[in-house]
């Protein structure tokens, strides 16, 4: 544990910042955004207020809980990697038992909100995503196979289905397409970062693809998954779920992603390029989901 001084974790604000960081706020923000888009795409007009407010809150709390469990369970590996060394647990800003209580409390609050004010199906599916990420991925898959993020990625791809379920009480077929988009986006998103950080993963014996199969093979996989992503990303237009605004935006987004992934395939040792591809992947998903939303309402309120 770090010595207590007046200018760090002993101050309440520093402690709140640490708890906030446990929730991986930026990741959770994008996850929640995909869930909210799933809600809006399930109805022609405005989403009823109750599922909108409580569904969003319940899903956000579950994702934050999963993130906090991940901080707790990975605290030893996190202490050894430059990218994660600054986190609250490796820094000794919080004691592990407090993080466990915090993560459990968020998870419990999420379940109560979803069961009482939303519906059982959303609560069950959200719970499965939480367990999928916090337990199946973090505890088992991450250290078991280089396909860890492909399988574990399913948990992060479910939120649009959760959003839709919160509104309709059932799974809308359109949101399965949104699930597939995030599912196929995850490998290029993460493997681009893993190429850049492969030495750190090797140091802590985590079998990420660039560690087990090298950067050339990983670069090829990033490119191939980006092609699959391109194909699935135009499906909302082809199935008439979305219109020309969505198609126009997506084609541009895909072209840039394909270009970056192709470059990465040619120069898989280029860490700067790998980080640029990773950063772009986040922008890609954000803009694609925003385009789905704008497109949906453009045709209802032209
Ligand atoms: C198994 C699935 C996934 C894996 C393994 C993964 C992995 C990662 C990693 C290692 C980082 C870097 C975090 C850091 O350095 O603090 C990251 C960042 C990020 N990820 Fe993912 N991710 C996954 C799924 C998702 C999903 C589903 C979303 C959202 C829909 C998402 C959104 C983000 C965002 C927004 C960031 C940037 C965070 C920041 O700037 O602090 N990720 N991801
Ligand atoms: C609805 C619901 C409950 C969703 C949960 C999904 C969720 C929180 C996904 C987060 C994805 C993510 C940041 C994975 C990285 O974990 P990592 O351990 O590989 O990365 P790290 O080394 O940065 O911690």
Image (cartoon, rainbow, N blue to C red):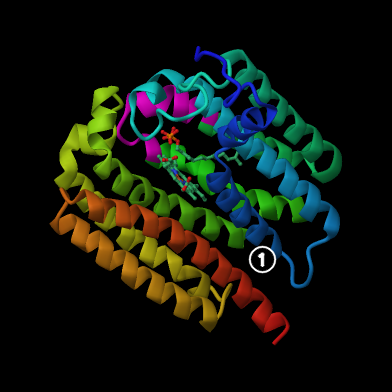
Question: Residue at 69% of width from left, 87% of height from top?
Answer: 302
Q: Is residue 140 visible?
A: yes
Question: Residue at the front extreme?
Answer: 6
Up/down of 282 relative to 118, above or below: below
Q: Main SS of the magenta segment?
A: helix
Q: Is residue 106 left or right of residue 270?
A: right
Could you say where residue 230 lies in the image, as x and y percent from the top left? 37, 66
Residue with the mark numbered 1: 41
Question: Residue at 72% of width from left, 25% of height from top?
Answer: 105
Q: Is residue 205 left or right of residue 242?
A: left
Q: Is residue 128 visible?
A: no
Residue nearest the observer in this picture, 268 or 209? 268
Residue nearest the observer in this picture, 88 or 60? 88
Exactly how many numbered labels are in the figure? 1
Disc 1 within 8 angstroms of ligand 1 (CB): no
Q: Badge 1: few (under 14), some or many (20 or more) residues near its Cα, within 10 Å?
A: many
Residue 34 part of the magenta-drawn span: no
Up/down of 162 relative to 246, above or below: above
Q: Write down the region rendered in magenta.
A: 134-149
Question: Residue at 26% of width from left, 44% of height from top?
Answer: 196
Q: Report which quarter residue 114 is drawn in.
A: top right
Q: Is residue 247 left or right of residue 52?
A: left
Q: Is residue 186 left or right of residue 109?
A: left
Residue 142 part of the magenta-drawn span: yes
Could you say where residue 71 lies in the image, as x and y percent from the top left? 51, 27
Could you say where residue 140 lies in the image, as x and y percent from the top left? 42, 23
- Element assignment for label 1: loop
Question: Residue at 41% of width from left, 54% of height from top?
Answer: 185
Q: Report which quarter residue 76 is drawn in.
A: top left
């Amino acid at each position: 544990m770090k010595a207590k001084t007046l200018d760090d974790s002993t101050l309440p604000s520093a402690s709140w910042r640490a708890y906030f960081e446990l929730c991986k706020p930026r990741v959770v923000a994008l996850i929640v955004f995909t869930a909210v888009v799933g809600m809006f795409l399930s109805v022609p007009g405005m989403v009823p207020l109750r599922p909108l407010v409580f569904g969003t809150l319940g899903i956000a709390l579950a994702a934050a809980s999963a993130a906090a469990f991940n901080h707790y369970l990975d605290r030893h590996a996190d202490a050894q990697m430059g990218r994660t060394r600054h986190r609250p647990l490796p820094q000794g800003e919080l004691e592990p038992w407090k993080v466990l209580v915090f993560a459990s409390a968020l998870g419990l609050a999420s379940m109560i909100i979803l069961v009482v004010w939303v519906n059982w199906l959303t609560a069950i599916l959200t719970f499965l995503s939480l367990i999928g990420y916090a337990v199946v991925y973090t505890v088992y898959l991450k250290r078991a196979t280089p396909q860890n993020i492909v399988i574990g990625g399913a948990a992060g791809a479910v939120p649009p289905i959760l959003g839709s379920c919160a509104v309709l009480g059932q799974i809308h077929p359109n949101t399965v397409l949104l699930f597939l988009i995030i599912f196929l986006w995850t490998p290029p998103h993460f493997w681009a970062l893993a190429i850049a950080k492969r030495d750190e993963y090797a140091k802590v014996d985590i079998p990420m693809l660039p560690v087990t199969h090298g950067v050339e093979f990983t670069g090829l996989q990033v490119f191939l998954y980006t092609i699959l992503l391109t194909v699935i990303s135009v499906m909302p237009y082809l199935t008439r779920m979305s219109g020309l605004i969505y198609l126009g935006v997506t084609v541009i987004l895909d072209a840039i992603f394909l270009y970056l992934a192709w470059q990465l395939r040619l120069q898989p040792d280029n860490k700067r390029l790998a980080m640029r591809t990773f950063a772009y992947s986040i922008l890609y998903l954000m803009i694609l989901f925003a385009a789905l939303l704008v497109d949906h309402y453009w045709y209802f309120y032209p």
